[in-house]
Amino acid sequence: MSRFKWTADSVGPGWENLVQPLIDLCTLYGIKILQIKEKFGTLQFYHAGDKRIEDIVRAVERASEHTCEDCGESGVASWGDDKPVYKATTGNIGPGHFWIKTLCVECRKKRNESTTP
């Protein structure tokens, strides 16, 4: 089976171990993958609506809520200044940042350092 190629418009390498089994399963069952992305710090895996894998997809999406998108370690969703953001949060503007990301402490620190002027 071919490996999914990570691109800037998909998700970070830390979620490869979450996403690749879904890609392999879709390949096995001949299910079309429509889109793979991150939204509000959570993996979103869209496929052609096959009920055989729906529960697995939802479980993997839930697992992404506490998996660092950069390295795959345990992470937490936040705006980028280490203040947790919960699922009830709506809108796309946070305190100084526009995206909620699920990251571990070390990866968040690296990102914050790389964006500090």
Image (cartoon, rainbow, N blue to C red):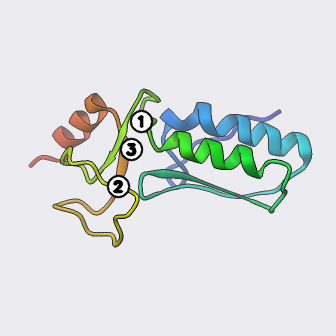
* Snapshot quadrant of residue 17: top right
Which residue is identified by label 1?
68
Q: CA distance from mark 2 to mark 3?
A: 11 Å
Q: Residue 28 sits in which quadrant?
A: top right
Amino acid type at image mark 2: Tyr
Between 5 and 106, the one lying in front of the other is 106
Q: Quadrant of residue 24?
A: top right
Q: Nearer the viewer, mark 2 or mark 3?
A: 2
The total of numbered circles placed on residues is 3
Q: Residue 11: which disc?
A: none
- Residue at point 80%, 48% (across, down): 53
Whole-number angstrom distance, CA of label 1 to CA of label 2:
16 Å
* Quadrant (top left, top right, bottom left, bottom right) of the N terminus: top right
**Local SS, label 3:** strand
Location of residue 7 in the rendering, given as x and y in whole percent from the top left corner:
55, 47
Say whether marks 1 and 2 touch (CB < 8 Å): no
SS category of the residue bearing label 1: loop
Left/right placement of residue 53 relative to residue 93 reads right
Number of other residues with Cα within 10 Å of mark 3, as a class: few under 14, some 14 to 19, many 20 or more: many
Label 1 sits on what residue type? Answer: Cys
- Residue that carries the numbered disc 2 in the rendered image: 86
Residue matched to label 3: 102
Looking at the rendered image, the disc whose residue lies closer to the viewer, 1 or 2, is 2
Where residue 65 sits in the image (x, y, percent)?
A: 46, 44
Which residue, as the protein is rendered here, is positioned at the far right?
Answer: 29
Cα separation between marks 3 and 1? 5 Å
Q: Position of residue 115 (x, y in %)?
A: 19, 47
